[in-house]
Image (cartoon, rainbow, N blue to C red):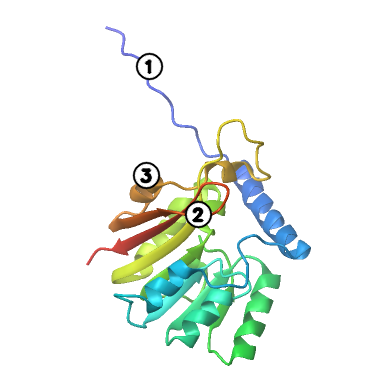
Amino acid sequence: MEQPATAQKPQPDPASEQREEESVHRALERYYRSGKPPWDTGVTPPELVALVEGPGALSPGRALELGCGTGTNAVYLGQRGWEVEAVDLVDGAVDLARQKAAEAGVAVRVLHGDATRLDELDVPGPFDLFFDLSCFCGIPLHRRDAYAAGLTERAAPGARLLMFGYGPEPVGNPVPEVASWAAGVTADELRARFTGWELLDVTPGTNPVPTFWFTLRRGA
């Protein structure tokens, strides 16, 4: 009896994946050159403030910010007793973050590098807190498992991940500059990719487009 055909999983195309990563880098650099990166407002979001200062606040420990931009939130954490390391892909943003930390008199360690390739950077962990302000949702889909694995390897038992991300682009919307950005990020994706983590909370953002705050906790 003839067996039914099974769907073939698309094979990776290294050249296409490389082009996608280069497109992301160029797009991010253009945002900074324009002076208007939408994720870099210069104001620490209240969701991070609540986690650090609100009821049941985390005790200061070691924090890693992924996609730190010009360092607003890394400096905020450092000022509140956290030992902070921060990573960004755009060298100009890294320079501004280092300058901001120096002016604030805060010992934040800012690294230029790829948040999906932490093994190439000197960030061994363990960390008690990870903060991501729209970094993950901008990562090409083929690099997202590597991002999750890098954090998982460096997470202390019970570590928290606070992530802000854009949801998927509604059907019919114009295709974004980088194709993978249309996928956004969803709770189901985080549950699937972050093995060993519990998704504690999903709170819609206040933006005019679909956005979400996700809180995850690493298992003991």
Nearer to me, 56 or 69: 56
Image location (x, y in percent) of residue 170 = 55, 36
Q: Label 2: few (<14), some or many (≥20) within 10 Å?
A: many
Q: Which mark is residue 188?
A: 3
Say what amino acid the circle numbered 1 marks.
Answer: Ala
Say what amino acid the circle numbered 2 marks.
Answer: Gly
Say what amino acid the circle numbered 3 marks.
Answer: Asp
Q: Which mark is residue 5?
A: 1
Mark 2 or mark 1, whichever is nearer to me? 2
Label 3 to label 1: alpha-carbon separation: 28 Å
Quarter the C terminus occupies: bottom left
Q: Which residue occupies 74% across, 58% down?
A: 30
96 lies left or right of 167: right
Q: Quadrant of residue 3?
A: top left
Q: Label 1: few (<14), some or many (≥20) within 10 Å?
A: few
- 13 relative to 83, above or below: above
Q: Which residue occupies 54% across, 59% down?
A: 135
Image location (x, y in percent) of residue 207 = 55, 53
149 lies left or right of 100: left
Q: Which residue occupies 33% across, 77% down?
A: 58
**Which element type, helix, strand or loop, lies under badge 3?**
helix
**Which element type, helix, strand or loop, lies under badge 1?**
loop
Mark positioned earlier in the residue sequence (3 or 2): 2
Image location (x, y in percent) of residue 155 = 34, 69
